[in-house]
C-alpha cells in the first residue's frame, strides 16, 4: 500500500505542477499584453503631442501671414480715407462709409502726423463672427 500512496502523491504533485505552470504562463501572457498596451498608449500620446505642436506652428504661421496682409490692407484703407478727406469733410466721408466721424478724424490725424493707425481705427466696421457659430451671444 505504501507504493500506492506514493504514486498518488506523485500524480497529485504532477497535477499541481501542471496547473501552476498553466497559471504562470497565463500571468506571463497577461503581463506581456499589458506591457504592449502601455507602450501603444504612450505612442498615441506622443502622436497627439506632436500633432498639437504642428497645429500650433501652422496656426502661428497663418496668423503671421494674416497680420502682414491685414497691415497692408489697413494702410490702403487709411490712404483711401485720407484721399476722400482731401475731397470732402470728415462728416461726409463718415456718412458715405457708414463709420463714426471720430474714426474718420483719427484717420486724418494719423495721416497728418505721419503715424500709423490704431488697428481699431483702420479695421472695417464689420463684426467678426463669434466662435462656434454664435451670433451676438445667441446659440443657433
Image: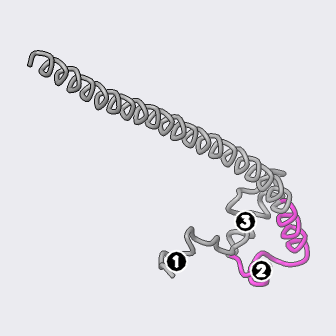
Crowd rating for badge 3 (residues with CA inside 10 Å; few <14, some 14–19, many 20+): some
Q: Position of residue 65 (x, y in %)?
A: 80, 52
Circles 3 and 2: CB atoms closer than 8 Å: no
- Residue name at image x 57 percent, y 75 percent: 133
**Would you say residue 88 sits in the magenta stretch?**
yes
Q: CA distance from mark 1 to mark 3?
A: 19 Å
- Residue name at image x 20 percent, y 26 percent: 12
**Magenta-highlighted residues:** 75-99
Crowd rating for badge 1 (residues with CA inside 10 Å; few <14, some 14–19, many 20+): few
- Mark 1 or mark 2: name the one nearer the start of the chain: 2
Q: Is residue 10 left or right of residue 109?
A: left
- Mark 1 or mark 3: name the one nearer the start of the chain: 3
- Locate residue 79: give its quadrant: bottom right
Query: Disc 2 designates what residue?
Result: 97
Q: Position of residue 9 (x, y in %)?
A: 17, 21
Q: Quadrant of the N terminus?
A: top left
Q: Position of residue 56 (x, y in %)?
A: 66, 46
- Locate residue 82: give its quadrant: bottom right
Query: Disc 1 designates what residue?
Result: 136
Amino acid at each position: 500500500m505504501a507504493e500506492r500512496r506514493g504514486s498518488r502523491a506523485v500524480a497529485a504533485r504532477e497535477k499541481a505542477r501542471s496547473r501552476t505552470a498553466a497559471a504562470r504562463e497565463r500571468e506571463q501572457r497577461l503581463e506581456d499584453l499589458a506591457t504592449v498596451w502601455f507602450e501603444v498608449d504612450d505612442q498615441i500620446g506622443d502622436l497627439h503631442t506632436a500633432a498639437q505642436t504642428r497645429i500650433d506652428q501652422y496656426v502661428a504661421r497663418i496668423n503671421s501671414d494674416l497680420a502682414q496682409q491685414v497691415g497692408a490692407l489697413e494702410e490702403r484703407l487709411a490712404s483711401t480715407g485720407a484721399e476722400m478727406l482731401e475731397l470732402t469733410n470728415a462728416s461726409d466721408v463718415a456718412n458715405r462709409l457708414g463709420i463714426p466721424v471720430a474714426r474718420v478724424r483719427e484717420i486724418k490725424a494719423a495721416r497728418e502726423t505721419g503715424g500709423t493707425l490704431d488697428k481699431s481705427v483702420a479695421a472695417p466696421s464689420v463684426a467678426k463672427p463669434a466662435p462656434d457659430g454664435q451670433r451676438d451671444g445667441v446659440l443657433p
